[in-house]
Image (cartoon, rainbow, N blue to C red):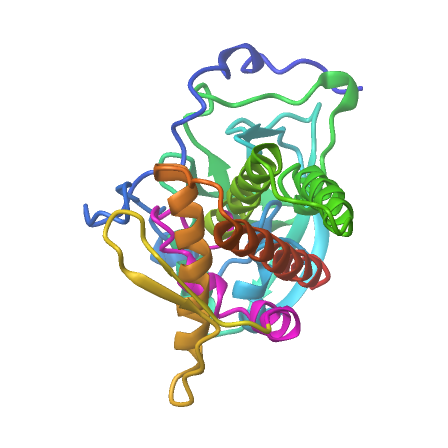
C-alpha cells in the first residue's frame, strides 16, 4: 500500500481553474486559452511518456498515431492525481507510488509536429514539460502544475496507477442514464393515447443538456477548450462521427436561434463540400441546446418531436464515437 505523500494535504482548492487560456491572448469563445509551450529544442528527439489522454487506446491518441514509430508500456515512480477528472502526475518523484503509461517514440523528422499537437491541446496552467527518467531512458512528460490548486488526490487504499478515459462518468454512467430515461419516454409513446406533457418535455431537456455536457467534455479534452461550441468543427471531422451520422440521421429540419433567429439546417446536402453538411448539422443540434439553455422552450408538439429526435440521434452518434475512440 502506498504511503502518504507530504504534498497531498496541499491539493484542494478551486476546481474551476483549468483549460481557460490562449497563447496569443486571442479569445476563443468565452475563454482565453494558453497552451503549454512545446519541449525545448534539445529535447524534441526524446520519446514521450504518455499516461493520460495520449496513451494508446485513449481519447487523443488518434491525433498523434500517424507520427508514432514505436510504443512500449512502462511506469514511472510518480504519484498520479486528478483535476476535474483529468490526470496529472505530481512534480516530485516518489517511490511509494507509480504511474503506468507508454513510452512513445516518434518517427524521425516528425517529432516536432507530434509535440506541437500535444502541446496545443493542454493548458499552461495545468501542465508543463519536464524531462524525466523512464527506466534507463530519458523522456519528455507533461508534469502537473499548480498542483496545490484544485487537485484531488486518489484514495490511498484504492490508488489506481492506470488512467482509463472510458471510465469517465460522463462517458459511462451519464450515457447509460440518458439511455434509460429516453427508453422510458419511448415506451410511453407507444401508447396511442399518449400526449406529451411538461414533465416529459423537461426530462428530454435535462437529458439533452447532460448529453451535450458529455460531448463538450470529450471535445475539450481531445482538442482544447474554446467555448461556444468551437470544438464542434473538429468533432464532425472525425470518421466515426460521419459514419454514425449517415447511419442514424435520415431527416432534414431547420431550427432558428432563439435570440438572433439564424437558421441552422440538419442534414442539408452539399455536394461540393460534404464537411459543410456535417458542420451545419452539428450547429443545428447545438442551436437546439442553446435554445433550451438560454430561454427554455414552451411545450408544443413540433418542439417536442424536434428535441426527442435530436436527443436520440445525437446519443446514438456519440455512443458510436466513444466506442470507436476507445478501441483505437
Figure quadrant of the C terminus: bottom right
| Res 19 seen here | no
From which residue to which does the magenta span run?
221-249
Q: Position of residue 232 (x, y in %)?
A: 43, 59
Residue shown at the point (64%, 44%) measured from the top left: 195
Q: Position of residue 180 (x, y in %)?
A: 75, 41
Nearest the viewer among 186 and 148 is 186
Q: Position of residue 290 (x, y in %)?
A: 39, 46
Against 270, residue 173 (above or below) is: above
Figure quadrant of the N terminus: top right
Answer whether residue 53 is magenta in the image. no
Residue shown at the point (77%, 23%) measured from the top left: 158
| Res 222 seen here | yes
In the image, taking residue 315 as reference, residue 302 lies left or right, namely left
Against 273, residue 306 (above or below) is: above
Against 105, residue 178 (above or below) is: above
Q: Residue furthest front?
A: 193
Nearest the viewer among 38 and 212 is 212
Answer whether residue 226 is magenta in the image. yes
Amino acid at each position: 500500500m502506498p504511503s502518504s505523500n507530504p504534498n497531498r494535504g496541499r491539493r484542494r482548492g478551486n476546481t474551476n481553474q483549468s483549460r481557460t487560456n490562449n497563447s496569443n491572448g486571442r479569445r476563443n469563445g468565452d475563454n482565453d486559452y494558453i497552451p503549454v509551450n512545446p519541449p525545448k529544442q534539445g529535447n524534441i528527439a526524446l520519446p514521450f511518456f504518455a499516461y493520460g489522454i495520449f496513451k494508446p487506446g485513449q481519447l487523443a491518441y488518434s491525433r498523434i498515431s500517424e507520427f508514432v514509430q514505436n510504443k512500449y508500456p512502462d511506469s514511472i515512480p510518480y504519484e498520479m492525481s486528478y483535476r476535474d477528472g483529468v490526470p496529472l502526475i505530481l512534480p516530485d518523484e516518489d517511490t511509494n507510488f507509480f504511474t503506468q503509461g507508454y513510452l512513445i517514440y516518434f518517427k524521425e523528422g516528425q517529432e516536432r509536429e507530434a509535440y506541437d499537437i500535444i502541446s496545443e491541446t493542454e493548458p499552461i496552467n495545468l501542465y508543463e514539460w519536464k524531462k524525466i527518467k523512464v527506466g534507463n531512458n530519458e523522456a519528455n512528460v507533461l508534469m502537473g502544475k499548480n498542483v496545490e490548486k484544485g487537485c484531488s488526490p486518489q484514495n490511498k487504499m484504492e490508488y489506481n496507477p492506470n488512467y482509463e478515459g472510458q471510465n469517465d462518468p460522463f462517458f459511462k454512467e451519464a450515457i447509460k442514464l440518458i439511455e434509460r430515461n429516453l427508453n422510458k419516454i419511448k415506451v410511453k409513446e407507444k401508447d396511442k393515447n399518449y400526449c406529451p406533457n411538461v414533465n416529459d418535455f423537461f426530462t428530454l431537456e435535462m437529458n439533452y443538456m447532460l448529453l451535450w455536457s458529455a460531448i463538450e467534455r470529450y471535445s475539450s479534452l481531445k482538442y482544447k477548450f474554446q467555448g461556444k461550441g468551437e470544438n464542434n468543427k473538429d468533432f464532425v471531422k472525425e470518421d466515426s462521427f460521419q459514419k454514425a451520422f449517415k447511419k442514424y440521421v435520415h431527416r432534414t429540419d431547420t431550427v432558428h436561434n432563439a435570440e438572433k433567429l439564424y437558421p441552422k439546417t440538419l442534414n442539408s446536402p452539399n455536394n461540393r463540400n460534404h464537411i459543410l453538411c456535417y458542420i451545419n448539422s452539428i450547429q443545428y443540434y447545438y442551436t437546439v441546446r442553446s435554445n433550451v439553455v438560454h430561454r427554455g422552450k414552451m411545450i408544443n408538439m413540433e418542439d417536442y418531436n424536434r428535441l426527442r429526435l435530436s436527443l436520440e440521434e445525437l446519443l446514438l452518434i456519440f455512443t458510436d464515437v466513444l466506442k470507436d475512440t476507445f478501441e483505437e
